[in-house]
Image: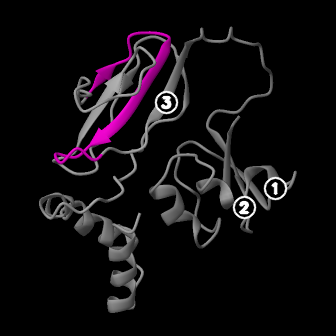
Amino acid sequence: MIFPRMTALAEVLWTHRQDYDNYLLRLNKQYKRLDQLKVHYRMPDLDGFTDNNVLVGKTVLKLQKPAPEISIRYTTDGTAPTASSPELPEAFIVPGPGTIKLASFSPSGSSSDIYTLNYRKQSFFPPVAAEGLQSGLQVQYFGSSYKSVTKLPDTADSIVNVNNAVIPEGMGKAVKPLVRNCWVTSRCLKQLFIAFS
């Protein structure tokens, strides 16, 4: 689809800057205008969930709408959501094992891709006896960039035990902003691998 890609291209060519986060904030305010102009556009992606999930006790699904006028609709019977499907509440309690399908809809009727979330029940693993453990976290620092966690070498450049999730001073120049903005994801693991000890 041409929209909103055309606006992204125009943004970069006119401003000579690549500030994607700032662009997204402004773009979210323009969906209403695109609807009024009857422009067919690609709906923004939904995020904040994974395709395969494990239920252990009460599980709450919380998603943020990409823009205020967009609604997120869902089904639990395996069918594709429509504009008349129930709207996902702000904090949806997952009813149990099964499948939830999600899609976002604009007031003009445009819809996003359909997202399928699978939930299965699982108990906690039984505790295991372990010896020689230290309290805290073992931080393993890898000074290079890697495209995948599977590409990390067997030995880290530095290993430190810490009592909190703050990266010790001197463990790399680019680590602090990386850790501040993310949980442990494949993107964050390019330079940092945290293993519980």
Q: Secondary structure at mark 3?
A: strand
Instruction: Please report contact status of discs 3 and 2: CB closer than 8 Å, yes or no.
Output: no
Residue ID for mark 1:
151
Residue 28 image position (x, y, % from top left): 24, 60
Magenta-tinted stretch: 91-110
**Cα–Cα gap, marks 3 and 2:** 26 Å
- The residue shown at (71%, 34%) is 197
Q: Which mark is residue 147?
A: 2
First in sequence: mark 3 or mark 1?
3
Residue 184 belongs to magenta span: no
Residue ID for mark 3:
116
**Cα–Cα gap, marks 3 and 1:** 29 Å
Q: Residues within 10 Å of mark 1 (few under 14, many from 20)?
A: few
Residue at the extreme left of the image, as rendered:
36
**Cα–Cα gap, marks 1 and 2:** 7 Å
Instruction: Please report contact status of discs 1 and 2: CB closer than 8 Å, yes or no.
Output: yes
User: Would residue 139 be found to the left or right of residue 8 on screen?
Assistant: right
Considering only vertical position in the picture, is 63 above or below 193? above
Considering only vertical position in the picture, is 92 above or below 179? above
Which amino acid, mark 2?
Answer: Lys
